[in-house]
Image (cartoon, rainbow, N blue to C red):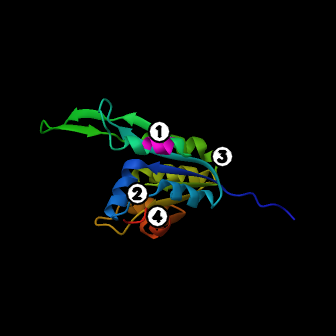
Amino acid sequence: MTDIMPERLALFIDGANLHATAKGLHADLDFRRLLDLFAGRGRLVRAIYYTAVVEGEEFSPVKPLIDWLDYNGFSVVTKPVKRFTDADGRSRIKGNMDMEMAVDLLELAPRLDHAVLFTGDGDFRRVVEAVQAKGVRVTVVSTLKTQPPQVADELRRQADVYLDLADLLPEIARPRA
């Protein structure tokens, strides 16, 4: 009789994308329940939350979440937002974490059996294909149940498994008051 090794899995959470998706579904996520749900499905190697932060602000709405995640089993990857002026002269901010997430996914791939990406961003299609070529199964978590849908069709098609966040809400959403 042989022991079956639990699947080594990691969560890669595009914070801004997941926030927009949950908001579109009128849900507030409970990250403890999310972590427990996936820890129960295998050996959780890493849970990484990616977000851009505005530096120099007295209060940032994302700061309490980042602190909580950092103390409760998540690795948090942040970088400062970039401020720029658009063609119309308006001040804008940009905080894209795609490159950080893609690099970490590729670096962790040799130590994983399964990667779970919380994003609907079609830019990840190619990196998903690359880690699949290394033998890693990829699940994408996003939603089709918002207008417009939050998941790019090409990313959904590339994934081995697509999970709609709306279907996970009974297990990972905070109960409504």
- Of the image marks 4 and 2, the number of the one nearer the N terminus: 2
- Say which amino acid is labelled 4: Arg
Compared with 7, 176 (above or below) is below
- The x and y percentages for residue 120 are 40, 57
SS of the residue under disc 1: strand
Confirm or deny contact between disc 3 and disc 2 (CB under 8 A).
Answer: no
The residue pinned by badge 3 equals: 111
- Of the image marks 3 and 1, the number of the one nearer the N terminus: 1
- Say which amino acid is labelled 3: Arg
- Of the image marks 2 and 1, the number of the one nearer the N terminus: 1
Closer-to-camera residue (71/84): 71
Which residue ends up furthest to the top in the rendered image? 56
SS of the residue under disc 2: loop
- Of the image marks 4 and 3, the number of the one nearer the N terminus: 3
The residue pinned by badge 4 equals: 157
Q: In this view, does 124 lie to the left or right of 4?
A: left
Q: What stretch is highlighted in magenta?
A: 66-70
Q: Does the magenta stretch include residue 68?
A: yes
Mark 3 and mark 1: Cα distance apart in space? 19 Å
- Dot in front, 4 or 3: 3
Which residue ends up furthest to the right in the rendered image? 1
Mark 1 and mark 4: Cα distance apart in space? 27 Å
- Can you see residue 8? yes
Compared with 103, 8 (above or below) is below
The residue pinned by badge 1 equals: 77
- The residue drawn where x is 22% and y is 38% is 92
Mark 4 and mark 3: Cα distance apart in space? 24 Å
Mark 4 and mark 2: Cα distance apart in space? 11 Å
Confirm or deny contact between disc 4 and disc 2 (CB under 8 A).
Answer: no
- Say which amino acid is labelled 1: Val
